[in-house]
Image (tube, rainbow, N blue to C red):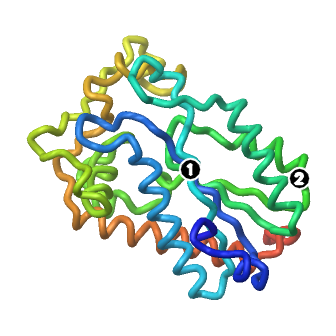
Amino acid sequence: MIAETNWKQVQATRYEVAVLPWGATEAHNWHLPYATDTLQNEALCAEAGRRAWEAGAKVAVLPCIPFGVQTGQLDIPFCINMNPSTQLAVLEDIIASLEGVGVPKLVLLNGHGGNDFRQMLRELQARHPRIFLSLVNWFHIPGAQEIFTIVGDHADERETSLLLHLHPEWVLPKEEWGPGTDNLWKIEAMRQKWAWAQRAWTQATNDTGSGDPQHATADKGARYLDLLAGRFAGYLADLARADPAALYERG
């Protein structure tokens, strides 16, 4: 955890992979804190980084960036927006700083659905060929269906369970949880998801949640964090050992 370490240790270590967690500051239903995405990212990176380090991978976890793309939520107080063009500029500076001192690989761990980094990484990889760039959206790591009754996409059973495990003191009592009901698009192509437009969040949701949190428990959150950390740590260890010039099995 780079924020907690020192120059003496850093100077003596040859790091193989850097991890950049990227979250958001936004409303999460009625009951979860605005920092939910950031808190989840920090906990996942800390635990996965620990496991990967113990497996022999020299992983450096950078501080989490707490602001994401909120262009569909600008009417909600304190949903702090960082435009994609700003994210690109921030990533450019971070990647250049890492590449300049010989860090060979960077993993961007995204914790917010409004962030979409893939096209940025295509552009930045072309500009910075000496550092290998990859992306993990933690909510796409497989396994949620093994634990949860209902999988939504914002302040749902998954996120509520994680926060009940990580920071129960910041979660309102269950009787204050909203149902997380989505309001469907009127246009059929949008409802079927083969046409896309940004959701206007206060129109698309009723409590800023998307997905029913009612079955969430701290035990499910602990099990889910263990599952996520194990799979992410495995990726970090594999990436640390990998040669970026030989990542494909030829047929």
Identified by mark 1, the residue type is Asn
Q: Position of residue 192 (x, y in %)?
A: 44, 25
Give the mark nearer the N terminus: 2 vs 1.
Answer: 1
Q: Secondary structure at mark 1?
A: strand
Question: Which residue is located at x 82 percent, y 56 percent?
Answer: 97
Between 53 and 181, the one lying in front of the other is 53
Snapshot quadrant of residue 176: top left
Q: Position of residue 155 (x, y in %)?
A: 32, 42
Quarter of the image that includes the N terminus: bottom right
| Count of residue discs | 2
Q: Check disc 2 and report the residue beneath it.
A: 128
Question: Callout 1: 10 Å neighbours few (<14), some, many (20+)?
Answer: many
In this rendering, position of residue 31 left or right of residue 134: left
Q: Secondary structure at mark 2?
A: loop
Question: Which residue is located at x 46 percent, y 60 percent?
Answer: 142
Question: Which residue is located at x 86 percent, y 67 percent?
Answer: 101
Snapshot quadrant of residue 117: top right
Outermost left residue: 175
Identified by mark 2, the residue type is His
Q: Position of residue 58 (x, y in %)?
A: 69, 80
Q: Position of residue 214 (x, y in %)?
A: 17, 46
Between 246 and 202, the one lying in front of the other is 202
Q: Check disc 1 and report the residue beneath it.
A: 110
Question: Which residue is located at x 77 percent, y 76 percent?
Answer: 242
Residue contact between numbered discs 2 and 1, judged by CB atoms under 8 Å? no
Snapshot quadrant of residue 240: bottom right
Between 50 and 134, the one lying in front of the other is 50
Distance CA(mark 2)–CA(mark 1): 20 Å
